[in-house]
Amino acid sequence: MIPSADHISTPAKWLGYCGLLPQLFIVVYSAMGAENLWVGQAMGFGYAALIFSFLGGAYWGIALMLPKAPAWLFAASVLPSLIAFATFLPWIWGLGWPVPSLIILAVCLLVSPAIDNIIARHFSLPIGWVKLRLHLSFGLGVLTLTLCVI
């Protein structure tokens, strides 16, 4: 079992939800005019990739705390950073970017709570973890997708 608090603290919840504000501001900025769109999409991509990589770090921390963590959990913790990096490559190579990369990141964010559900079925997590992760992933995923359709 992971030694942790029984519940997610109120400050942790609020700070988690505040993590959606940068992407919300980026969506608003991008919608303010066509001249802002590409820069907004680039900023939104960067933020989504950063947070998706951060999620992998959370999974890595959980895996390290487990006495007998399964190998799949370590793999799941590394994949977000690798996916985020792979979605950055088209920009580096001058290919179709940023919309395809934004879509990939958004979909990955939207399905990431499935990993949380698997972890919660097998290991003890603080009460509220899965719900908070669902809210945050859904929020960031939808905001990231919004950048594709502005």
Image: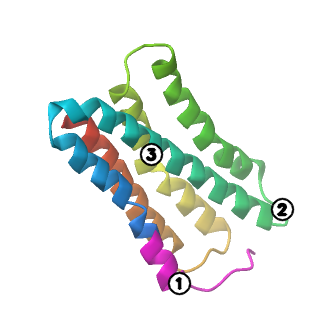
| Residue 79 picture quarter | top right
Q: Which residue is drawn at 51% across and 76% down?
A: 12
Secondary element under disc 2, as helix, strand or loop, is loop
Tell me residue 32's x, y (percent): 15, 43
Quarter of the C terminus within the rendering: top left
Q: Is residue 140 left or right of residue 122?
A: left
Give x and y (percent) for residue 136: 41, 62
User: Residue 12 in magenta?
Assistant: yes
Q: Residues within 10 Å of mark 1 (few under 14, many from 20)?
A: few
What's under tag 1, amino acid-wise? Ser
Numbered range of the magenta stretch: 1-15
Foreground of the two, 53 or 74? 53
Q: Name the residue under label 1.
A: 9
Q: Is residue 131 left or right of residue 121?
A: left
Image-based side of 105 in relation to 30, left or right: right
The quarter of the picture where the N terminus appears is bottom right
Mark 1 or mark 2, whichever is nearer to me: 1
Residue designated by label 3? 48
What element does badge 3 sit on? helix
Q: In the image, is residue 71 above or below residue 20?
A: above
Left or right: 55 in relation to 28 = right
- Disc nearer the start of the sequence (2/3): 3
Callout 1 secondary element? loop
Q: Is the magenta stretch mostly helix, strand or loop?
A: loop
